Amino acid sequence: MPGLEGPSDYSREPPRHPCLQINAKEPFNAEPPRSLLVSSYVTPVDLFYKRNHGPIPIVDDLERYCFSISGLIKNPKKLFMKDIWMLPKYNVAATLQCAGNRRTAMSKTRKVKGVGWDVSALGNAVWGGAKLADVLELVGIPNLTSTTQSGGKHVEFVSIDKCKEENGGPYKASIPLSQATNPDADVLLAYEMNGETLNRDHGYPLRVVVPGIIGARSVKWIDSINIIAEECQGFFMQKDYKMFPPSVDWDNINWASRRPQMDFPVQSVICSLEDVNAIKPGKVKISGYAVSGGGRGIERVDVSIDGGKTWMEASRYQKTGIPYVADGINSDKWAWVLFEVTVDVMQSTEIVAKAVDIASNVQPEKVEDIWNLRGILNTSWHRVQVRVGHSNM
């Protein structure tokens, strides 16, 4: 589209924060240290994980930038940023999580394919923009529509970036039209992140934010939106980001046998401790994050300091001064919950965390039970080792 360019090389990448742990340089994929991740409820833009599949697009003329909405509709249109800015602006607190979060740990059990991620391939931001439901009304699609008169049932988002997986074509993904046209689903065409204009890494000038599902569907750098009859047939919908059982490997995989992953399961991670820690005996603060997909709140976070034999409940919070209630009107339904508990650790042990959401979904105990060849959705109990010694350790 005019005004937005998808480069073919990495010579014009944006600057990044030096503390980021780089998991892949080209395309750039990086995450913050886990201890910094939970230092605030809203993740600073510089510390928000970077997940890319190609060179970062460049805006050369914002006034000329536009995107098309077409497909199975009567009134296709081209829209400019001024058209989006004229619509009501909404701010939505939502946690985006890469489906590959905690992939490195899963790969230690049995090797998987994909970019390695520790525990910080997620972040919580306040996204500002127009609701997709309002944008679709501009082309004659009413709210709460599941099928257009021409048979459109899905909304496909096409980026301007260039991906090797698409043979140099753009990244793309789709969501059901019923979700896109539901104002309560809070799907945004976002142009702000934490009160500031999106930066290049996070989709400037315009991106989709789909709360409650894996980050792969929140397409950045929008080039076009298509109303289609079937879900997107792109690589990342049909030959990636699908959940297979542990019995499936690369010699017997049938991609068509599984639906594209959308929702994500309940997850929690200890961020105040590394995988292995040397500490003095005494009080230890255990803190981290918990999050579940689909807008399901976190009912409980359990912490064990004896490898899972006995448990205690951690306190949960989101915004300062506002008590967190899992499905409360003052809680951010699409956002993570931070947790903490202070415990006495007098001997070497394994500390474990697991969360329960409001649907009583619980994290699986063992990663072996959910191993899959692409290493997605590692939501097993999070475990860290603590070695207690004297002060000279």
Image (spheres, rainbow, N blue to C red):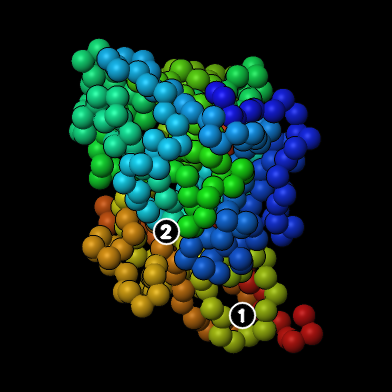
Amino acid residing under circle 1: Gln
Percent coordinates x, y for residue 390 in the rendering: 73, 86
| Residue placed under numbered mark 2 in the picture | 336
| Residue placed under numbered mark 1 in the picture | 347
Q: Nearer the viewer, residue 206 or 226?
A: 206
Q: Nearer the viewer, residue 105 or 217?
A: 217
Q: Could one spot residue 303 in this view of the protein?
A: yes
Percent coordinates x, y for residue 106 in the rendering: 59, 45
Q: Could one spot residue 112 in this view of the protein?
A: no
Tell me if 351 is positioned left or right of 136 in this view. Answer: right
Tell me if 103 is positioned left or right of 86 in this view. Answer: right
Percent coordinates x, y for residue 188 in the rendering: 38, 42
- In the rendered view of the protein, which quadrant contains the N terminus? top right
Tell me if 364 is positioned left or right of 117 in this view. Answer: left
Mark nearer the viewer, 1 or 2: 2
Instruction: Give the crowd class for mark 2: few <14, some 14-19, many >=20 residues within 10 Å.
Output: many
At 53% from the left and 30% from the top, the residue drawn is: 65
